[in-house]
Amino acid sequence: MDWSKFFIPTLKEIPIGTEAVSHQLLLRAGLVHMLTSGVYSYLPLGLRVLKRIENIIREEMNAAGAVELFLPVLQPIELWQRTGRDKTLAEVMIRFKDKKNRDMCLGPTHEEVITDLVKGFVQSYRQLPINLYQIQTKFRDEIRPRFGIVRACEFIMKDAYSFDKDKEGLKKSYELMYQAYKNIFKRCRLSPVIIEADSGAMGGDVSHEFLVTAPIGEDEVVLCPACGFASVEGDSRHPGQKCPQCAKEFLEKKTAIELGHVFQLGLKYSSALGANYLDEKGQEKPIVMGCYGIGVSRLIAAIVEMNHDAKGIIWPAEVAPFDVEILVLKTDEPQLMTLARQLEQELARRGLAVLVDERDESAGVKFNDADLIGIPFRVILGKKTLSDKTVEIKNRRSGAVQLVPVASAIEKTAECVGS
Amino acid sequence: MDWSKFFIPTLKEIPIGTEAVSHQLLLRAGLVHMLTSGVYSYLPLGLRVLKRIENIIREEMNAAGAVELFLPVLQPIELWQRTGRDKTLAEVMIRFKDKKNRDMCLGPTHEEVITDLVKGFVQSYRQLPINLYQIQTKFRDEIRPRFGIVRACEFIMKDAYSFDKDKEGLKKSYELMYQAYKNIFKRCRLSPVIIEADSGAMGGDVSHEFLVTAPIGEDEVVLCPACGFASVEGDSRHPGQKCPQCAKEFLEKKTAIELGHVFQLGLKYSSALGANYLDEKGQEKPIVMGCYGIGVSRLIAAIVEMNHDAKGIIWPAEVAPFDVEILVLKTDEPQLMTLARQLEQELARRGLAVLVDERDESAGVKFNDADLIGIPFRVILGKKTLSDKTVEIKNRRSGAVQLVPVASAIEKTAECVGS
C-alpha cells in the first residue's frame, strides 16, 4: 500500500483541547478524526488497528465456544420498560419518536434485545448452554466526552451473552469468558488488573472488571504492591479495609481505563422478560444469564497509552496497522523505487502488510511521520542503498538499526518481524 | 461448527404478514429476526452470509484502488444545513437533540461528513485522486418498511466517495467503480440491468443504477428484449421514447430491486462545503466528486429471490454461510459421529467451512432444515454408511446424488465443492 493513496493525514502540532497522550497521538498519526465532540471517524490506519483487535477478539471468543451475530441499534423503548432500564439508563440513552410514532432508542447495550430473541427460540434444556456475541456500535449520550475515543458518544463494543440452565452452567460459561478475556488482553499486550467489582446498573451477583492503569482514565484503582490486592476506588462493596494486612500508607492509588467487564447476571433479565426453558423434568425455569463486554475502540487508546514515546506511537506487532514500512528517501531514483516494489511484493507474499512511503517529501518528514505512526519495523532505502548496496532495518521500539546487504533484505526483514 | 451450538432457529410455518419469498425464507431459515417493523437482527447464519458478501465487496473495492475507513453514525445537523439536505432528506432522517442541546441526526448517507473530512486534509492536486469507502449501518425513518431487509429502517451499505481534480479524473474513478460493481454482482451470481438514471436528491449529472429484476422490489424497469434497452419506469429523464425503434407492445415492465447506484456528483458537495485544492498553477479549485453505493444487506435478499425453490434457499457457492453440511442421521452411533468429526476436520483443513447437524432429531427434520438453509453440498451419514461403508453427497442446486465409499468421502466432497 502506498502512503500517498492511503489517506494518512498526520499533524505536526498537538491538537488544541486534548489532554490524553493517546488522544493526541491518535489524532496526530491520522488514525482518528473528530467530527464533533465525542464522535470520531476511523481513518484507514485507525480502521486497520480496529480490525486487527476485532479479529483477536473473534478468534478468542470463537475458541471459547461463543457464536457471533449482529443485533440492531434501533430498539423499541417498550422492551426497556419491561426491565425498568429505560429509567436506570435514562441519563445516557438517546431516544426519539419515529415517523410511525414509535418510542425508540439507540442501544447503549443489548441485554434486553438478546434476551427477547433467545426467549423466542429456546424452549428446552437441550438447547442450552449457548453464548452469543456481537461487535457493534453503541451509543451513549455523554454529557462530558473525555480522552478522545476513551469516553465517546459513539463507540464499538464486543458484547457477549451466555444462557445456561443453572448456576453451575453460568459459572462454567463465566470462567470460559474470563479466560478468553485474559487471552485477548495478553495478545493486545495489555496487562489489566482484574478486580471483583460492583455490578451497578447491570444487576447480578458477581462481576469482574478488567482495568489497565494509565496516566489517564475514568476509574481509580487502589493497589497494594505487597500483597497484590486491588480494588476500585469508591466501590462501596469492596472498600480498602478488605485488605487489612496492607498498611494504608503503602496503598497506591492509580487512574485506570476500564477495558472489559464480565457479569454473572443471574435471573434479572430472563425473569423480567419471561425467558424460560423446560428442564429435564418438564418444569419451566428462568434461563440463567451472564454478560461480557469489551470496549473495542477504547482498547486502541489503552494500547497507545502504554506504547508510545516522545516521537509517537509504538505498535505491538499483533495490532499494528502494518507490519513493515518501507521508506524510499529518493523517489526520483528508479533503482530505489524498483527495489521498494520488489521488497513490498516479496514481503506481502509472506503474509506481511507493507506500507510504502513513496511521497515526494524530505527524509526528515518521512522519518518523523514513521516515528509518529509507529509501524514496528521500517526499511530505509536511501543514499547508502545506491552507494553500498545496503538497506537499513530499524526497530521502532528498541531503536536498534541493522545495515543489511540488498540481496538479503527480504530475508532479514521477514526475520525481524518474526514471520 | 455444530448445529446445536450455532443458534439456527428454523421455522416450519411461513411467518404471518410477509409477502416476499426472500423475507419468508430468511426468517424461516433462521438468518434474520425482526425486532420491530423495519429493524432486523442478523443471526449467526445470516451474519456469515453478510460477511462473505462484505468480503467480496472489500476485495473488489481494494483492487480498484479504494481505501476503507469508518465514518460516524451520529452527525451534527449543521453540516447538512450547509448543503440544504437537512430539508431534501427530511422525510427519512432520524433527528434528535442531545443532552448538550446539539441538533443531531443518524446518517442516512455520508457525503457531507466525508467531504468535510477530506476538505480538512487535502490541499494540493498532488494528494488527488483519492477514493474512500466504508461498510456502515445507515438509518432511514421508513414510514412503510417492506420486503424484510429490502427496505428497512436500519441497513448496511457500502458507500464510496471519489475525489478528483477534474472531470477527466472523475470519469476514470467512475469507470473503475462501474467495473468493480460488475465484478461484485457477478461474484454474487446476480445479473443486474444497468440503467442510466436520475440523480435525484444526490445531485450531479451522470448516474447509473444497478437493478435486478425479481418478483418483488420497489422499482419498475422497462425492458426491450429486442434491443436490450432498459429504463426505470417513472424516470422523467429517460422515458420510453428514448428507444423509438422498440414497438411499445413488446416492451416488458418488471419489478426490480435496486442493488447499487453510482453518481458523478461533480461540484455539488465540494462547493457547498468549500472543499477546494490548489492546482498545478496554484489556483484554488473545487474538488470533483463521485459517490458509489451498494445495499449490502439488501443483496442477501436479492440473492435469495434469485436462488431458491419450494423447499428453501439455494446459496451460490461464494456467498454460502457454509460450504458443506454434514448430516449425521443416527447420532447415537459412535461410528457415524467419529466419521463426521474426521470429515469435518479434514474438510476444514482444506479451507472449507463445515456445519455438522448433530442434533438428536429425526432424519426428516434434518433433511427439511438442510433444504431450507440451502448449504451447496451435504454429506449424509446414515444406515448405508454403517452397512455398505458409503456416504451420500448431494448437490442442493441440481439435486444430484452420489454414493461414495467412506474411504474417498473427503476427496469426493472437496472435489464437488471445487476446492
Image (cartoon, coloured by chain):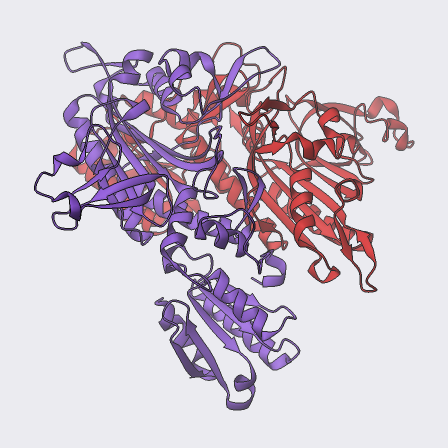
Chain colours: A purple, B red
- Can residue B12 be seen in this snapshot? no
Quadrant in the picture for residue A366: bottom right
Q: Against A406, is B365 above or below?
A: above
Task: Give coordinates of residue A289: x percent, y percent.
Answer: 26, 23
Q: Nearer the viewer, residue B194 or B139?
A: B139
Q: Residue farthest to the front?
A: A249
Q: Residue at x 32, y 21 (%)?
A: B364
Determine the image quadrant of residue A101: top right
Looking at the picture, does residue B408 appear above or below residue A79?
below
Q: Is residue A275 visible?
A: yes
Quarter of the view holding residue A247: top left
Residue A81 spot, x, y in % from top left: 40, 11
**Left or right of A283: which side holds A274?**
right
Residue drawn at point x = 55 percent, y = 81 percent: A382
Residue A304 locus on image (x, y percent)? 41, 53
Q: Is residue A415 left or right of residue A244?
A: right
- Please name the residue shown 52% across and 86% down the image: A384
